[in-house]
Every structure is written in structure tokens, then in C-alpha cells.
Amino acid sequence: MSVTTAEAAARESAKPQDAPAYFECRDVHAYYGESYIVQGVSFEVKENEIVALLGRNGAGKTSTLRTIARASEPHVTSGEIWLDGQAIHTRKAHEAARTGIQLVPEDRRIIPGVTVEENLILAQVSEPKGWSLERIYEAFPRLAERRRQEASTMSGGEQQMLAVARALARDLKLLLLDEPYEGLAPQIVREIERIMMEVKKLGITTIIVEQNAIAALELADSAIILDMGQVAFRGSAKDVLDNPQLRQEYLAI
Amino acid sequence: MTINSVFLQLLTGLQLGAIYALIALGLTLIFGTLGVVNFAHGALYMLAAYCAVIIAGKMGFLAAIVLVPIMLFVVGIALERGLIRYFYNRPHVDQILVTFGLAIVVEEVVKWIFGANNIPFKLPAWGNGVAFLHEYIPFLEGFVVFPKWRLILVAVSLLTVFALFALLQFTRFGLIVRAGMREPEMLRFLGVDITKRFAIVFGLGALIAGIAGVFGGPITQVSPGVGMNLLVPSFLVVVIGGMGSLAGALIAALMLGMALAFTAEIASLQQIIIYLIAVVVLLGRPRGLLGKKGVME
Ligand SMILES: Nc1ncnc2c1ncn2[C@@H]1O[C@H](COP(=O)(O)OP(=O)(O)OP(=O)(O)O)[C@@H](O)[C@H]1O
Ligand SMILES: [Mg+2]
């Protein structure tokens, strides 16, 4: 009996020293000011995996992505975030970006008052850099045509392309996409989907948040469902699609 | 009014506006980038003027021109790192209180060391005397002179303004700062340490106050209270121009300079003219001439 207790104790004490997965959130808690939003989120993502992060409006998807990108709000109060063996939870936003986290925010955050090309140049101010401008313009001919245009005067779809291109301009290990298809016409959505398939072929580890769960699950290998700031489900994309109860309860599809 | 007197008043307006412009430019630059209302900016001017008197006395005026702006840049960086940065996320009222408090402390220390009175600031030989404008400008009639030093002040102000605009508009550093003013968080997400750039901007604001102190000191006096005397109208210039707008501050400074020059003969009006302008402009445009939505609201 004493042996089993010792074994259990040893297992307990060994747990926190477990090597983290390629990307991992361990019991992350974060607040917007006083409001408790991210309430103990834990999940793992394998290298090259594409994960759909799903859940109802207000479930905490955006907040979780912002927490991972180390935005100043929501601010983390406890928990750990690891990427490729490096602690992210101890870093500031610009340091997290330099370790390879790239957030494409839901409102795109194209920098107004400067050109398309300047938006891309700004992505390459700090090391490590990713795609060269030539490679970006090859992959995004629409951006090449508009390189001298003020970026905020482009259409929503073009701005979304620029937001994704800006992330690729950096040497990234984890891409965080917050509703990349939001508010876009079907034709543009298809164009962005084509880019996403290319990103997938490149093997970039990605977490994608999307209202359109079906579209996200088509692209993703696996899914996380958030509810009230916690992980309610973690499994394969197929598990979600095959489970009507899950779909109804959390996704309304 | 004769063409001569109109011309001289325009020139006077330009010169009066120039000092306000230099101080307001630093204020609005710091506000636009860091979101900090720096009421210690006048104290930086005052410090610069004292440093300039001392250095000019010991090593000559040219040494002061070179050294004082550099010293103020260093003081600015130290101030930002040591104090101001802790107030970025605090309400504007807190920022005003702490910088105002700092200004008073600096003023008292200077008073204690150098006394409360104006200390004379001798002009260098090359800047002394008057310029005979009628020799250069054909439409002036007869004999028209203007103090040389005041012309130099206008020229230096113009140069400073152009240099600042060129820095912000045509360099990579300027691109980062301009982008950071609009989307600081996104720049951080792209790996840019924008806070570091903004600290340099604070230093630049102080450097401009340094330039203003060296060239303005001989005109405005060098006394402990000179900073505060300049701060109030300069701050109004920033508000009239629109908080955070460089171009707005320039236009407002010019307006104020002209208004002061053209009301010179009516002392009672001259004393309130700046407030009159502020009221009229802000009634029509609550955000100031070129103020942007969402700034300090
Ligand atoms: N800046 C903020 N300050 C305070 N509370 C916030 C803030 N931003 C979001 N919240 C709250 O945090 C909760 C989660 O919001 P979040 O934006 O993360 O949800 P979401 O899953 O992305 O929703 P949606 O599908 O609508 O984008 C919500 O209750 C929201 O009201
Ligand atoms: Mg969201």
C-alpha cells in the first residue's frame, strides 16, 4: 500500500515536469480588467496540425488567441503556454512574436495611413523574417498590383489577404487565425481558402477560429470546442462532424 | 497700415509662433505616440536655456548649439525610462499631476541654485544687431530693420520642423513610429518593440525643447518661471491644433503668433487673444483643427 502511494506521489510530482507538446496551454487563466474570461484552458497542438477552435459567440475564442499572442489584455494570471520548448507565458507580445507566434486578428488590423508594401515591411522590422516580398507578391498577385495603394482603402477581402501575407512575412511556428472569412463575399472566401490550403501544404501549425464551423473543419485535422472560457471538447474534426449532440449544443449546426 | 508695418507684424507673428511651435511640436509628438500629456515639457525648455547660458559662457555659443539638444535628448530618455513609462496606462489626470509636479520641483531646484531672477543671455556676435530688410526685399519702402536673432530663430524653427517631418515621413524609423501611433498592438504582434521606439520619440521631443531653449532663451528670458510661462500657451496650441496632430500644432502656433503680433497695440486684447482663439476653434471643432476621433475623449 505504501508502495502504491509513493508511486502515485512520484507520478504527481513528475507531472509538471512533463515535456510540453509542440504547442501547449496548461491551465491558463486570463482576465480583461476584472472580468474573468479565460478560465483554465488546457490543450495541446502537434507540429503541423491544423486545429479549429470553435464555440458560441462569447465563448472566449478571441480571448484565447489574444492570450496566446500575449496581448496585454486579457492578462494572464496563471498557467503556462509553451511553443516548441520555449515558454511563452513569460514573454511580452513582441517577444512572443519573435519566438514564432503570429496572430491574424479578427478585425485584421491593417495599419492605416501607410501602403500595402509598408504593412509588409513593418512585419519584417524584427527578426526572424519569413517569406520575402517577392514570394509574397507571387502568392498574392492582388497585393502585388496594389503595393503602392494605401492599405486601408482596399476591400475587406484584400485586407484579409494582406493580414495573412503579413503573418507569412514572418518566420512563424504557430499561426493564429481569428475568423478569416468573416464578412467576405463567397468568391473572396474561396480565394482565401485556396491560400489556407497552401498554408496547410507548407505544414504551418495553425489554430483557426471560425463561425462557419463546417468550413473550418474541412480544413482542420482536429477541433477544440470552447464554452464559457473552458475547453468543452477536444477531438478530431470527424468526431465533431459525426456528433449531432455536440454540434447542436455548442455550434448550432 | 503701411506695407512696412504689415510686413513687420507678419514677421513678428512668425517669430512668436516659432517658439510656441517648437514646444508644442514636442508636446503633441509625445502625446500622439505615447498618449502622455507631458506638463514637464516647459521645464525641459527652461533647463535647456540654463544649460545654454552656462555652456555658451564657458565654451562659446556654437558649443551650446551642439551640446544642449544632445543633453536634453539624454534627459528625455532618462525621464521616460525613469518616470513617464510607469504612467502610460494611467488616466491623463495622473500624468498631468506627476509631470506638473516634476516641473515645479525642477523649477524650485533651479531657483535655489541660480536665484529667482532672469539671468542675462548674451547673443553671439554673429547673431547680434539688426538685419536691414529693405536691402533684400524690394517692395518695402524706406528703412526696415528686424533683429537678426529673431530671424535666426525663425529659420532654425523651420529647419527643425522640416527635419522632424522628414524623419517621420521618409525614414524607416519614422514609418515604425507613424504605424505605432495608429496600431501599437498590431506592431507588437509583428514583433516590433514599439515601446522602445516611443522612448526615443520622447527623447526627440526633449531634444526639440533643447533647440528651442538655446535659440529662444535670449528672447524669452532665462528664469525659473520661463518654462511654465511658455507651457500654458503651448499646450493651448496643441489643443487648438488637435491633440497629437503635428500639422495642427504648427497651424495653431502660427495663428497664435499672428494674433499676438496683430493685437500688439491693444494690450488688453493681446492678453486674452489666445483664449479667444481656443474658444472659437473648439466651439466649431471640439477636437481641434486637425484632431482625430477618439483621441483624449
Ligand atoms: N475588452 C474586453 N473587456 C471585457 N470583456 C471582454 C472584452 N473582450 C471580450 N470580452 C468578453 O469576453 C468574453 C469572451 O469574448 P471573446 O471575444 O473571446 O469571444 P469569442 O468566442 O471570440 O466570440 P465571437 O464568436 O463573438 O467572436 C465575452 O463575454 C466578452 O464579452
Ligand atoms: Mg471572437
Image: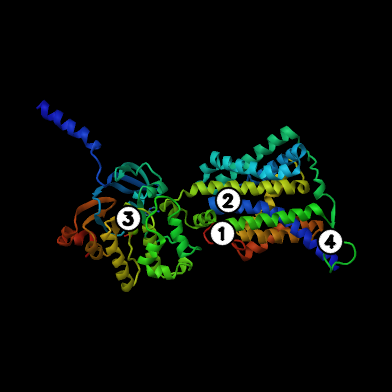
Q: Amino acid at mark 3?
A: Leu
| Label 2 to label 1: alpha-carbon separation | 19 Å
Is label 4 on the same chain as label 1?
Answer: yes
Mark 4, secondary structure of its residue: helix
Q: Position of residue A190 (x, y in %)?
A: 29, 70
Tell me the mark number nearer the camera, choosing from 1 and 3.
Answer: 1
Residue B70 lies left or right of residue B81; in this view the side is right
Q: Nearer the viewer, residue A29 or A171?
A: A171
Residue A167 lies left or right of residue B230; in this view the side is left
Give the mark nearest the N terminus, 2 or 1: 2
Residue hosting label 1: B170
The chain to which mark 2 is attached is B
Mark 3, secondary structure of its residue: strand
Report which quarter residue B226 is drawn in. Answer: top right
| Label 4 to label 1: alpha-carbon separation | 35 Å
Mark 2, secondary structure of its residue: helix
Mark 1, secondary structure of its residue: helix
Q: Quadrant of the N terminus of chain A?
A: top left
**Disc 2 to disc 4: CB gap under 8 Å:** no
Tell me the mark number nearer the camera, choosing from 2 and 3.
Answer: 3
Give the mark nearest the N terminus, 4 or 1: 4
Quadrant of ligand 1 in image: bottom left
**Disc 2 to disc 1: CB gap under 8 Å:** no
Q: Residues within 10 Å of mark 1 (few under 14, many from 20)?
A: few
Report which quarter residue A137 is drawn in. Answer: bottom left
The chain to which mark 1 is attached is B
| Label 1 to label 3: alpha-carbon separation | 32 Å
Q: Residues within 10 Å of mark 2 (few under 14, many from 20)?
A: many
Residue hosting label 3: A175
Q: Amino acid at mark 2?
A: Ile
User: Outermost residue toward the left?
Assistant: A1
Report which quarter residue A195 is drawn in. Answer: bottom left
